[in-house]
Image (cartoon, rainbow, N blue to C red):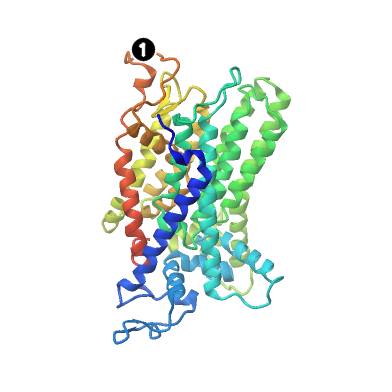
Amino acid sequence: MAVPAPLDHPAKSLCAIYALRTLSVLLLAWITTYLFPSFSPLGYDTSSTHITRLGNTRFFEYDASNDHQQGIGSVERLVTALTRWDAIYFASIAKHGYRWEQEWAFGIGQSYLLQGYKFIRAFISSSDISPSSEIFFLSICSCIAHLVSAITLFHLTALLFQTTDRSKGRSPTRGSPANIVPFVAATLHILSPAGIFLIAPYNESIFSALSFLGYYLYSYAIKNTAIDGKHEWWNEIFLLLSGLFFGISCLFRSNGVINGILFVFEVSQSAWRLVSGINPFANLRLFIASGVSGALVSIPFLWRQYAGWLEYCIPEEYSVKREWCNKTLPSIYSYVQSQYWGVGFMKYWTAGNIPLFLLAAPMLFVLLRTSSDILKITAPPVNRLYSLSLNEANRDLLFRLTVPQLLLATMAITNYHVQIITRLSSGLPMWYVVTAAALIQTTTADTEVSESKDTSSESGKTGDETDNTDASWCRPAIHFFLGYQVVQAVLYGGFLPPA
């Protein structure tokens, strides 16, 4: 099979794909500000002006005689098109911190980024930063983070499946699926159904970058730990760094705490080996490192709850404490999500939300289907994950990395505003990997076969045949995601739902 040219320089190719995709989505959102004169460029809602300070409703009234919007240029239109929906909250929190109770549902990470930018900029210029410049800065952070997460996903996928046969000193051939799938997975992330939310001043891009870095470091540490717990000292450093990255990601999206379950697996295994007397010293170190790493994941989230408690439950000026202050485990996040945003178990299951469930259905299907595919390959005789050979893969590691995805998909169905799963899924790596493997299988006739085929005692088929060979589901899903990005960019640019 001929090696596609992009594989010669994968990083450059990914950057080119990213630039083309980002400019296309921005252009769509920007053009939208010209499409609907009755409410553009402000959009259907005028809330953006509270952040951009570009004017008011009267200032932006459409002038039919001049056939253009008065007092606003192309750059201002783009700023306005990016400042929609939750971006208004994110931008406000980044500038002022939490001012209202309902804002505690959103991460505060961007506020630290903006403060850091202002601190550095103060050495260069004493002038204030305009609201438009703040929006651009946060959007640039999102764009950079999106590209970083795509490149990290490329290396993560390669780490999971692309190994060298040390005994023979051989690596997979350049045209093998083990080399192609990482590039396709990274490309799918660039073309994520999260779309313009990965460009706008939202938290998704930065959360994805931090999460993927955490996944990579965690996977590297686990893959280099022997089955009896033997490992080098730097494995512990990698575990601690992965916990740190996961923890920092929780400052941007609270659902990052789900990733803490990865360390529960390692704590449990090292504890079992300790009790069994297997390599006590090595497993004790691994047990401690895993436990501390898990704690690092939860600390930022718990710190935010404590800060909220200090804000609303301690000051004497509040004659009556907020009702959540008196709970056994007072959590401002849980209260705000339920009280102001209607988040809770089965709260979203109403007739009026059926269209939103239908909108989320393709993404939920992909998450559940790819999770199921991973669960099926956790043990022999299955030797392939679509186009990928599992001969060198750590199946236990693949299972671990899939658990957060399965948990998030379940919570999206039962607890969250279900339509946001198209955004939240951008921080989950495994569905990109499995979808990429399935896509390669549908497009490549001469995929690699395993060196040995195990016969299944139950079905009488080979290990390759017992795997999920029906990969046809991936093409319609990818077509939907690509089409949805176009529609989403136009709706977002006009401040129209869904968000």
Q: Is residue 296 above or below residue 467?
A: below
Q: Is residue 370 visible?
A: yes
Q: Residue at x 51, y 52 (%)?
A: 146
Q: Residue at x 51, y 30 (%)?
A: 161
Q: Is residue 67 above or below residue 74?
A: below
Q: Residue at x 49, y 79 (%)?
A: 53
Q: Is residue 163 above or below residue 154?
A: above
Tell me the quadrant of the picture where the C terminus can be found: bottom left
Residue 10: where, in percent of width, then height?
51, 42
Q: Quadrant of residue 134?
A: bottom right
Task: Count up the numbered dots.
Answer: 1
Mark 1: which secondary structure?
loop
Q: Residue at x 48, y 47 (%)?
A: 14
Dot 1 surroundings within 10 Å: few (below 14), some, or many (20 or more)?
A: few
Q: Amino acid at mark 1?
A: Ser
Task: Say whether residue 157 is left or right of residue 411.
Answer: right
Which residue is label 1 attached to?
457
- Front-lying residue, 302 or 427: 427
